[in-house]
Image (cartoon, rainbow, N blue to C red):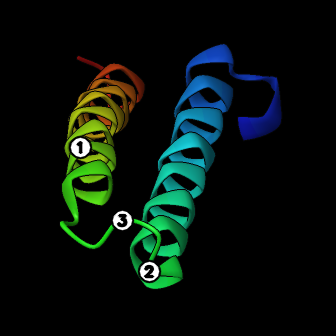
């Protein structure tokens, strides 16, 4: 079962982290407290990095579970 697979759990938690970063970045941008958008832009770069890690985890999971 997937819920017993540590790699699946890691990928799922990492995906939720990306979602949290996305929501925080959108909130920062929409809040209007940063008129230049510099902080929101920096947060979105963090999101891109986290997404890259999640994609690697998901592809690794699919590769390992398909028999390698």
The residue wearing badge 3 is 34
Asked if the residue under mark 3 is in contact with the one under mark 2, i.e. CB atoms within 8 Å, the reply is yes
Percent coordinates x, y for residue 9 in the rendering: 68, 29
Q: Secondary structure at mark 3?
A: loop
Kindly report the distance in space between the C-alpha atoms of the residues bearing marks 3 and 1: 12 Å
59 or 64: nearer the eye? 59
Q: Secondary structure at mark 2?
A: loop
Name above or below for residue 28 compared with residue 58.
below
Percent coordinates x, y for residue 37 in the rendering: 22, 65
Task: Kindly report which numbered mark, 3 or 1, lies closer to the viewer in this rendering.
Answer: 3
Sooner in the amino-acid sequence: mark 3 or mark 1: 3
Write the residue at 39% across / 73% down. 29
Q: Mark 1 Cα within 10 Å, few/some/many (few <14, many 20+)?
A: few
Write the residue at 71% across / 38% down. 2
The residue wearing badge 2 is 32
Write the residue at 60% across / 53% down. 20
Q: Mark 2 Cα within 10 Å, few/some/many (few <14, many 20+)?
A: few
Q: Which mark is residue 25?
A: none
Sooner in the amino-acid sequence: mark 1 or mark 2: 2
Asked if the residue under mark 1 is in contact with the one under mark 3, i.e. CB atoms within 8 Å, the reply is no
Task: Kindly report which numbered mark, 1 or 2, lies closer to the viewer in this rendering.
Answer: 2
Residue 56 found in image quarter: top left
28 or 47: nearer the eye? 28
Q: Secondary structure at mark 1?
A: helix
Percent coordinates x, y for residue 45 in the rendering: 19, 43
Percent coordinates x, y for residue 23 in the rendering: 55, 66
User: Quadrant where the N terminus lies?
Assistant: top right
Name above or below for residue 35 compared with residue 42.
below
The residue wearing badge 1 is 42
Name above or below for residue 24 compared with residue 42.
below
Kindly report the distance in space between the C-alpha atoms of the residues bearing marks 2 and 3: 5 Å
């Amino acid at each position: 079962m997937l819920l017993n697979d540590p790699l699946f759990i890691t990928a799922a938690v990492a995906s939720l982290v990306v979602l949290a970063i996305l929501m925080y970045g959108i909130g920062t941008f929409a809040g209007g407290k940063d008129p230049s958008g510099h902080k929101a832009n920096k947060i979105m770069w963090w999101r891109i990095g986290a997404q890259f890690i999640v994609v690697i985890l998901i592809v690794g999971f699919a590769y390992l579970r398909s028999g390698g």
